[in-house]
Amino acid sequence: MGEHELRLLAADEATTKAVGAALARILVPGDLVGLAGDLGAGKTRLVQGALAALGVREPVISPTFMLVREYEGDLPANHVDAYRLAGATELEDLGVEEVFTPDAVVFVEWVDRVLAALPESWLELVLQTRPDEVRELVVRPHGPAWQARYEQLEAALGPFTGSMAHPDPFPDAG
């Protein structure tokens, strides 16, 4: 674990959405994308960008009070917000099989609250807001399915690893 990770920079909300859209291009049914990070770091923005790229036309709003919202696009997509869940068992009570369905792409905000309920292969995105308001995103593939797609991931998100916000001070680190 952790041998592969990508570090991205997003200078603004539009770029955060663009990261989501770029990621969406490589998603297939059954993929689970888990998002973690501070309140206001851009998790919902990123999902909005991804869902728009997946052909969802309706407005995407944070599912905090609904826990799960389902969208129909070119691929069906489920957007889960685990912020108010006490843990993985509560997610299981909601019916994990219906939420993590093999024919939909699933986005889980506050994924760190429900790690025990996740499938073996999933994609982790950790968003942090730096003091200069630039968002840093760390992308970590988990499990064999995502490890096998790492090059695809790198190709899709590569444009965001460079100097979008600031030149990378440690180009060879990691």
Image: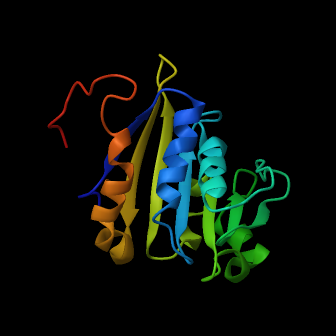
62, above or below 95, in the image: above
Query: What residue do we see at 78% from left, 73% from top?
Result: 94
Q: Position of residue 91 (x, y in %)?
A: 71, 69
Query: What residue do we see at 66% from left, 45% from top?
Result: 44
The reply to whether residue 75 is visible in this rendering is: yes
Please state if 87 lies on the left or on the right of 120 as rendered: right
Quarter residue 159 falls in: top left
As drawn, which residue projects farthest toward the left?
Answer: 172
Quarter residue 76 falls in: bottom right
Q: Position of residue 168 (x, y in %)?
A: 26, 28
As drawn, which residue projects farthest toward the right?
Answer: 65
As drawn, which residue projects farthest toward the top?
Answer: 132
Query: What residue do we see at 55% from left, 78% from top?
Result: 30
Q: Is 21 in front, or is 140? A: 21
Q: Quadrant of the N terminus?
A: bottom left
The reply to whether residue 37 is visible in this rendering is: no
Q: Quadrant of the C terminus?
A: top left
Query: What residue do we see at 56% from left, 77% from top?
Result: 29
Please state if 164 lies on the left or on the right of 61 as rendered: left
68, above or below 40, in the image: below
| Count of all numbered marks drawn on residues in the image | 0
Q: Position of residue 35 (x, y in %)?
A: 55, 52
Q: Position of residue 140 (x, y in %)?
A: 38, 56
Q: What is the image's colouring? A: rainbow
Quarter residue 165 falls in: top left
